[in-house]
Image: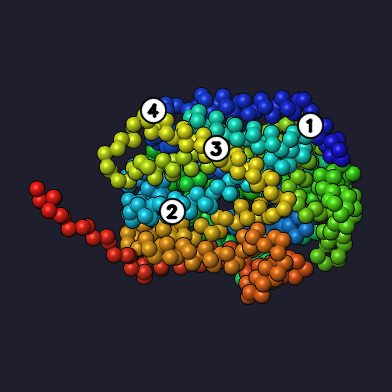
Amino acid sequence: MADQPIAQLFTLTDWAVLFGYLILCTVVGHRMRGQQASIRDFFLGGKTLPWPAVSGSIIATELSGVTFIGVPAGLFALEGNFTYLQWALGSVIARVIVGLWFVRVYYEREIYSSYDYMGHRLGKGAKTLATVLFFVGSILAQSVRVLVAALPLKVVTGLDIGWCILIIGIFAIAWTLMGGMRTVIWTDVMQFFLFTIGGIIALFTVVNSLPGGFGELWNTASDFDRTRTFDWTFGLQAELQFTMWVALLAVPFQNLTIFGVDQLCAQRVFCCGTPQAARKAIIFSSAGQLVTFLMLLVGAALFVHYHHHPFNEHEAAIAFPATAESSSLEQLESAPHARHPVSGLESNVAVPKDGDAVFPMWIVSILPAGLSGLLLAGVFAAAISSLDSILAALSQTTLSLIYHPERDDGTSAEDPTLVVKSRLLVIGWGLLLTGFTYLMLSVRENIPILPLAFGMTSYTIGPMLAIFLIAMLGRGSVRGLVVGTIISFIIVLLVRTDVWVLLGTDNDAFLEMLGSLPTYTYTGGDLKPVYSFVWTWPLTVILTFFCALLIPPGRPKQEAAPGPASHA
């Protein structure tokens, strides 16, 4: 096999380090699990977790293996640069708002999620609607995190991708069962430190290999427009995604949902002992943007490295997989190259269409044995961390549809049978998500399942935040929320292309018909959006919010008049 030489570089020492690190994480998670006598212990860590650990867990959950691999790959791409970093500003703004206002209402009573709060304020209908949106938005997105991490790991380790997925699934279920949120958070902290250390090692390895050091790295990357950071262009066009206006006006809405409403990250906010500690955890998690900056620098370093050392035959086989139409080398020769924005000077870097395997390939090719195993162990562990986080969130929200902590109906949270049910839900969701990842793997070559999975959160972000804001306001109709959610879904459906391409992947007439709509263009067999989907985040929040305020609730059902038997 053409890529076998790269896989052979992953030595027995690397394998020992990789599994040694996973075992170490398991041991640490077991030692830190604490008492698991109630769902308060299982889902909230007994509300005894220190805020720095919670903050590190939020960062690790936000970054994940997709960020560790995808951010450098994004900068390595043809138009890659630092403009993605502008989104950090909107993210910090959102975290401050969550810390100052959302956290306060969450600690008014003993609840386990933002959906419990919605149920207490608006009733069961609002809670069920928000929970269903969470299910829809997270199942695809979190499964694909596992798949995206498993694909490059398969390439560089030589391990079958099915085994990569299975290892991730087994460890994720085991870590979650072992100690609930306590184990999840403490293993997340380990991933956070390994991410950071791994990024620093990669960056300094390239810097030390260059005669001019960091100055040469920065100057070479700048020559090919890789270090451009600010873009003040305003517009709604699809290509204007990473601009300062998007960062200030759209990203805060997205991140308010991610960190304050979506249970994947918000669950950690409930694990602190006081609202003051929770506030510190969410606000100080803004430090994770420094890790994003670090990984962008790693992407620039990869660009400079391959500018000086172009892909060889074996690396080309990974960066440019052979197709039925052409070989890897033919694709390498025809691939576009980065150019100097002024002089038009062409770089030596052939830019692949999908560069997610480039960073793991570099790790195995350049770093010494053992060290490469440690960094790829971090990618494995990050995928496990993403999966165990969503398992804890899904099992809690599912249980909460049965046991309602917001009702005060006499059901005790100390009931040990609830812990048993929680563990069964973890196993059930773990098997479902692992199986769903296999399903995506089986169809990924025929339909664009990855863009569909990542895009699913855009359908749910606006309505989820609107439901929470209506709950804070304390008035509004569930019927209006449902109407707003449906309209929001249709709006996103008419801006994004993923669902349509999925449905009509082999039907050119169908895609051409969609291309006649004002929100799409269809040229050369490719359906593309006209407008950037990021503006649907604030739009759908505002639309759903006002639908809830303006649409009256339905008439309550009238109880039947008592019959003669009831007077007996």
Q: Percent position (x, y) of residue 235?
A: 62, 72
Residue at x 73%, y 31% (from the top left corner)? 373
- Please name the residue that numbered disc 4 is placed on: 37
Q: Is disc 1 in contact with disc 3, using a CB cutoff of under 8 Å?
A: no
Secondary structure under tag 2 reads helix
Residue at x 85%, y 46% (from the top left corner)? 316
Q: Is residue 181 visible?
A: no
Estimate how packed mark 3 is, as few (under 14), some (14 to 19) or many (20 or more) residues with alpha carbons within 10 Å.
Answer: many
Q: Percent position (x, y) of residue 193?
A: 61, 36
- Please name the residue that numbered disc 1 is placed on: 10
* Along the line of sight, the residue nearer the viewer: 347 or 350: 350
* Along the line of sight, the residue nearer the viewer: 60 or 417: 417
First along the sequence among labels 2 and 3? 2
First along the sequence among labels 3 and 4? 4
Type of residue at label 1? Phe
Q: Nearer the viewer, mark 2 or mark 4?
A: 2
Q: Nearer the viewer, mark 2 or mark 3?
A: 3
Q: Distance between the residues labelled 2 and 4?
A: 28 Å
First along the sequence among labels 1 and 3? 1
Q: How far apart are marks 1 and 3 (CA)?
A: 29 Å
Q: Can you say whether 308 is above or below 248 in the image? A: above
Residue at x 57%, y 55% (from the top left corner)? 456
- Please name the residue that numbered disc 2 is placed on: 130
* Along the line of sight, the residue nearer the viewer: 413 or 283: 413
- Please name the residue that numbered disc 3 is placed on: 430
